[in-house]
Image (cartoon, rainbow, N blue to C red):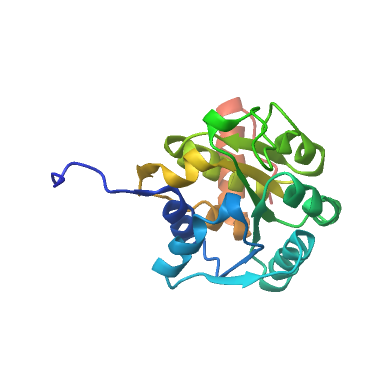
Amino acid sequence: MTSPTTPRTILGTDYILEALAAEGLGHLFMVPGGLVDPFLPALARQKKLTPVVAAHEGGAVYMADGYARASGSFGAALGIGGPGCCNMATAVAAAKTDGSPVLVMTGEVPLDLEDRGTFQDASQATLDDTAVMAPLTRLSKTVASAKNLNHWFRHALTAMWAQPRGPVHLSLTHDALAGECAADYVAVSGFFAHAWRLSMEAAETALRLLADKAGAKSRIA
C-alpha cells in the first residue's frame, strides 16, 4: 500500500501509451513482434489509443507520417529492432526530408542479453539501431531503463517539434518496457503545436521601454 506522498508507478509500456494519449495521439501504427510484445497487454488495458497493424514496418512509418500530415499533429510507429528498424529506414528518411514529425519506437533485447548472440539483438554492441537511425532523424537514443523514460520521451518529442521539425527514434530495451516508472507526465506538444501571434502593442511597448532605458527617443509612430 502506498502513502499519499508516494508517486503512482506503472509499467514502462503503460507509461508510453498514456504519454502518447496525453499528447493527443489517437492511433499507433505498428508491426507486432517479440521485442515489442509487452505493448500488447498494455494496449488492451487502455482505450484512448487505437493500434493499427501494418504488414511491414516501413508501411507503419509511412502511415504514421501520413497521419501527422493529415491531422496537423504527429504520428507514432512501433516495431522490433534490428530487421524491423532497417525496414523503417526509407520511410523515416522520407519523413526527415519533408520535415514531418514522427516518433519511431523500436524494441530491444534485455540489457543482460546484449552482445550474446541473442535473436534480433540490435544493441549498441551489434548492429546498433540508434546508429542506423541517427542520420535519418533529429534524435536517436536508447532507453535502457524505465526510470529514464520520462526524460528521453519528453526530450525526443521536444526535438521532434522544434525547428527544423522531423522524425525522432527511441530504441526501447525490454528493461525499459517491463520496468516500473513514475506515472506523472507533462505533455510538450501543446507548446510547439500552436503558432503564437505577435502582439504589436506589446512589441511597441517593449521598444519604448528599451529606448527609454537607452536614453533615446522612440521613433515609433
Q: Residue at image x 73%, y 33%?
A: 128
Tell me residue 142's x, y (percent): 61, 35
The residue depicted at 69 percent of the width and 26 percent of the height is: 125
Residue displayed at 73% across by 30% down: 126
Numbered marks: total: 0
In the rendered image, which quarter is residue 119 located in? top right
Can residue 159 be seen from the camera position used here? no
Where residue 96 sits in the image (x, y, percent)?
A: 81, 50
Residue 93: x and y in percent read: 84, 50
Left or right of residue 173: residue 83: right
115, above or below 162, in the image: above
Residue 171 in the image: state x and y as whole percent.
63, 42
Q: Residue 121, relative to residue 25: is it above or below? A: above
Q: Which is nearer the eye, 134 or 178?
A: 178
Q: Closer to the camera, 49 or 195? A: 49
On the image, which quarter does residue 143 sit in? top right
Look at the image and tell me whether residue 145 can be seen. Answer: yes
